[in-house]
Amino acid sequence: MSAIVKDIEALAQRIGRRLPPVETNFPLKVPAHFIERIATCDHDGLLAQVLPTAAENQTVPGFSADAVGDLNARPAPALLHKYHGRALVMLSPRCHIHCRFCFRRHFPYEQTLGQAAWQTTLDYLHRHEEIHEVILSGGDPLTLSEAQLTDRVRALEAIPHIQTLRIHSRSPIAAPALTPQGRFLHWARHSRLNKVLVVHCNHPDELSKETAEVLARWRQAGFTLLNQSVLLRGVNDQEATLEKLSHSLWAQGVLPYYLHLLDRVQGAAHFEVSASRGIALIQYLRQRLPGYLVPRLVREIANEPCKTPVEVI
Ligand code: SF4
């Protein structure tokens, strides 16, 4: 059994279902753990996140290749600097999973590769003393080898004004067995940096015994664990699903942080849920959950100085 499946026929065999072949410009990619979760759940909310559909090839007004203005916020090829005090480093162009709604599905990652791009990033971070937090993103930064990842974070730790390392990753949820747990966590235990891991989980059925184990190891290494979800039509746009997601995350030591309205990226329009529906869902969660288990409903708007809260009165 291969750890990652990259064609529809193989996915169909693994989950025991017929799946229609569809050509899109964003290839299918699903890791073994996520396939197991698809196969064991009784709905299509997980499969829909990874299965290419003909709807992706439709042109929909208002949906663009660069939905959140990443391309205009790059002082260096692998660096985004949008918000005060924080900068985002695209450490890897790869992910273990391809989410059909990904806001970076059209990003020109080839420009972020190589030693020159990394050195330009480090030079920028050294010069900008107001940056106190570095966010590792991609792609998925946890697709690097333990050795590469540890080398990169050591270089960031050596910049005196950086206080916090934040990692954005879907690996602990989608591919726990492929998530660094050895040398990198050893470094983390002894690092002077504040450490935050923001995972990406959209549905409670993505969580398992394996995700709990890997998340526990990261927590023991000193990481604060948060989750961000995307509100997706047909996946998690029901009250009971989001309520269970908050409970299930917390059972694994993860606090719900953001619930994002969909970034309006070309190919993902069929996943969009309206802001008014998002507000209604959050109002429901507020009545059912303690405040710390209610995620903040936000939208990212290009050129804004922060994520924009979607107001719930
Ligand atoms: S893991 Fe994140 S970056 Fe990778 S495809 Fe999914 S949403 Fe996009």
Image (cartoon, rainbow, N blue to C red):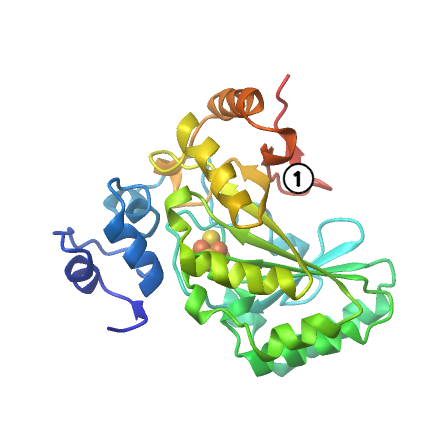
The front one of 291 and 76 is 291
Residue 168's spot in the image, x, y percent? Answer: 58, 57
Q: In the rendered image of this protein, does residue 165 appear above or below residue 310? A: below
Determine if residue 30 is in view.
Answer: no
3 to the left or right of 197: left
Q: In the rendered image of this protein, does residue 253 appear above or below residue 121? A: above
Q: Residue 129: which quarter of the image?
A: bottom right
Q: Residues within 10 Å of mark 1 (few under 14, many from 20)?
A: some
Give the residue drawn at x 54%, y 53%: 199
Q: In the rendered image of this protein, does residue 110 appear above or below residue 9? A: below
Residue 216's spot in the image, x, y percent? Answer: 56, 60
201 to the left or right of 60: right
In the rendered image, which residue does mark 1 sit on? 307
Residue 117's spot in the image, x, y percent? Answer: 64, 75
Residue 97's spot in the image, x, y percent? Answer: 39, 60
Q: Residue 153: which quarter of the image?
A: bottom right
